Image (cartoon, rainbow, N blue to C red):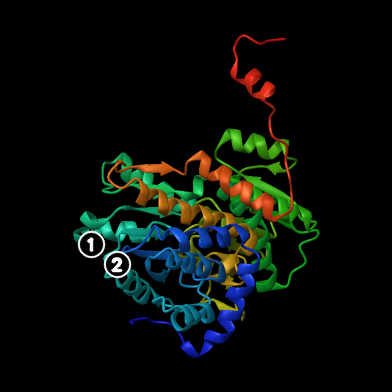
Amino acid sequence: MDFDVKNVDLAPGGRHRIDWAELEMPVLRGIQKRFKDDRPFSGLRVSACMHVTTETANLMVSLQAGGADVMLCASNPLSTQDDVAASLVSHYEIPVFAIKGEDNETYFKHLNAVLDHKPHIVMDDGADLVSTIHKNRRDLIGNMYGGTEETTTGIIRLRSMARDGALKFPMMAVNDALTKHMFDNRYGTGQSTMDGIVRATNVLLAGKTVVVAGYGWCSRGIAMRARGLGANVVVTEVDPLKALEAVMDGYRVMPMNDAAPIGDIFVSATGDIHVFDKHHFMLMKDGALLANSGHFDVEINKPALRELAVSDPKRVRPFVEQFTMKHNGHRLNLLGEGRLINLAAAEGHPASVMDMSFAGQAMAAKYLVDHKGELDNRVYTVPAEVDQEIASIKLAAMGIKIDTLTEEQVTYLDSWEEGT
């Protein structure tokens, strides 16, 4: 078995952590039992490009239980948990190509290693696998059933491809499932982003001014958790409806140029480029912290930051690079190299929210198998009945019961003749 991990001797520790996460993933555990019986992926190859974490490990094991021949590479150079990668190789015989801190050359080498697997299904987190197939590995297209995509950033790329007629196989937008973006993006990103910032810096959030770029689901969660820790939260937006929502939720809303001089901590989660840019850096106060929770490391304009600095940055803590500005001597601190701070400096989302996200991944992959040859080359939303099923399983696992409609209520809601 070919693989590339840091050290297989780390496997025992990784196994313990995978098992610990599994305790908090009852939905995926139930799906795994179903997959063991039904074997929906027998004879199929699945290549995944995802964050190599304990939660992802449980997804890979569930796919394997369903008969899939699985391979995994990292979707971000700083998100890999090396002991988990080692355990997947050693204990589950799943080939993994991921090393925390790998350089760009190694990253793309690993991407191609899992594509050499000639997959029938790809699972993507940022659309790098799909993009590489369409750009450089078009020989694989004829073999594809389709793929699944985990992130907002990836879906933006995929919808652009579909709009241009470039997408050559169907993709499932797992991120758009309600059980994904309403919970993973909001509660998972909110908590894990604050966790990453605190682990990287050990700052007190209470009393600080935290500037959150954007007010999508991820940024909503970040703003909510920052406020819960006592921070004064400012939101910046380009969408008038989302800006209005932020105002009605009790946050100050202003342009980034106005927020830059007053912020202590800046966090972006927009999926766009240069959200924090050169002219913003020139306005920021001494000691400002810059963090990103968007998928790619382009939201903070790192080349501009280096250009404004007097010299190369000074590493003042394991995940903190300090840039001293030429024009005023202010020290700006870049966290986690501008990559996903919740995975670079912390452990990512709690397993309990990834449980729903990865249940969606598993069910979306099964949907592709069940509907092979029936789907167009476009981006599909996870069916509502799948969302409902995942939510129902989660509630049952939490010991929560809900009401059901009576026959009279169903008839009333379905009838146009009933009224006041």
**Quadrant in the picture for residue 371:** top left
- The residue labelled by disc 2 is 115
Q: Is residue 37 above or below residue 234?
A: below
Residue at image point 55% right, 40% down = 238
User: Which image quadrant for residue 381?
Assistant: top left
* Front position in the image: 81 or 256: 81
Foreground of the two, 159 or 17: 17
Secondary element at tag 1: loop
Q: Which residue is mark 1?
A: 137
Tell me which label, 1 or 2, sits earlier in the chain.
2
Which SS class for mark 2? Answer: helix
**Total numbered badges shown on the rendered structure:** 2
Label 2: how many residues lie within 10 Å, few (<14), some (14-19) or many (20+)?
A: many
Q: Residue at x 56, y 80 (%)?
A: 15
Q: Are marks 1 and 2 in contact (CB under 8 Å)?
A: yes
Q: Percent position (x, y) of residue 272?
A: 47, 51
- Can residue 246 be seen here? The reply is yes
Which residue reaches farthest front?
Answer: 37
- Under mark 2, the amino acid is Leu
